[in-house]
Amino acid sequence: MQKHVMSAFALAVVSLGAQAQSSLTVYGVADAGLVLEHGGEAGSVQKVSSGVGSSSRLGFKGREDLGDGTVLTFVLENGYSIDTGAAKQNGALFGRQALLCLSGAAGALSIGHQYTPFYKTLNNVADPFTTGLAGNAQNVFDDTTRVDNTVEYITPRVAGFSADVQYGFGESAGDRAKNRYIGASATYEQGPLTVVLAHQQRDNASATAHSRNTMLVGRYKFGDITGHLAHARNRDVYGNESHDSLAGFTVQLSGANHLIASYIDHHDSTTAQKHARQAALGFTHGLSRRTDLYAAYGHIRNSNGALFRVGTAADSGSGTTGINLGVRHVF
């Protein structure tokens, strides 16, 4: 009897130890604001919108320590509209992210529905607006945010250098190139300087052509001011080329206040010359560590029939001028 009691006690201790090495975090963003849009073909629009500064979301992140420095993590993230309660990403349960990742001294290997290296470079380094508000860089730059059926490997950081490589399976019978995605980025980060080179290629459904984007990004922190520069060269599936350039800054003001601004130039290299320019200004005021107020203005000047629109983090927009005012809570 004593032997069985001791065995049960030992099993309980082992179970408690395993639980102590595992964790589950529930997190999210609740973002709602007023959006005014002008310059659209159907006229001006005034609306209450969700995901203006950051897309509203509810996520679950789990972690288990497997020993010897190896960690298993998973992320399941749902997008929703706080103004209507409806699901985003065409109603997908975890349409923002769904992945498993093994990480250790040799780097991180993940599989699932994931952000692309190109998007992460644009969002995390290039864009002062972090692809949100009326100044959103994805109003003009490529908007491939995430891809299904991907395998991704991120190297450890060595002497400031790291790399991110991603392959998205097209999963089409008879030809692996159909609907395939290939993306990669190389980063150098040391002190106040960050430089990233990112590239992506997407094959069409018949594997007869592909689009591609290559972007070089630089970010430098001068005390309370952070400068952002980016240049992208694009080619669509028809072989048409264009260039996108961004210059912007973020200024940390007194307290928890930030001023952000950017200017984007889209140069169409085809004979159509469908150029566009976007200028944007934003301001955020922190009410607490998790909650802030925001205001932003963005305007796009289209030329020769270009159709770029001023959107937000979760909405592509309907006009060439956008004004935002809202609140964001991170939990």
Image (tube, rainbow, N blue to C red):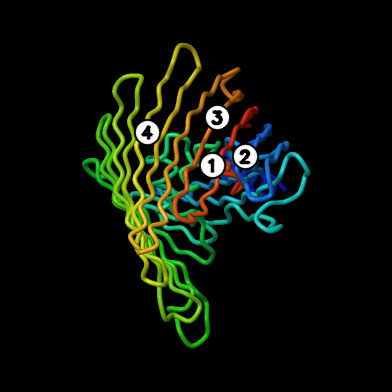
Q: Mark 1 is on which residue type?
A: Gln
Give the number of the disc on residue 21. Answer: 1
Q: Is residue 208 above or below residue 10?
A: below
**Residue highlighted by disc 2:** 38
Q: Which of labels 2 and 3 is toward the front?
A: 2
| Mark-to-mark CA distance, 2 and 3 | 14 Å
Q: Which of labels 2 and 4 is toward the front?
A: 2
Q: Secondary structure at mark 1?
A: loop
| Mark-to-mark CA distance, 3 and 1 | 43 Å
* Disc with the residue nearer the chain's start (1 vs 2): 1
Residue placed at 66% from the left, 48% from the top? Answer: 79
Instruction: Residue at the far bottom: name it.
Output: 174
Q: Which of labels 3 and 1 is toward the front?
A: 3
* x and y percentages locating residue 35 in the rendered image: 66, 35
Q: Are marks 3 and 1 in contact (CB under 8 Å)?
A: no
Instruction: Residue at the far front: name it.
Output: 304
Q: Mark 3 is on which residue type?
A: Ala
| Mark-to-mark CA distance, 2 and 4 | 24 Å
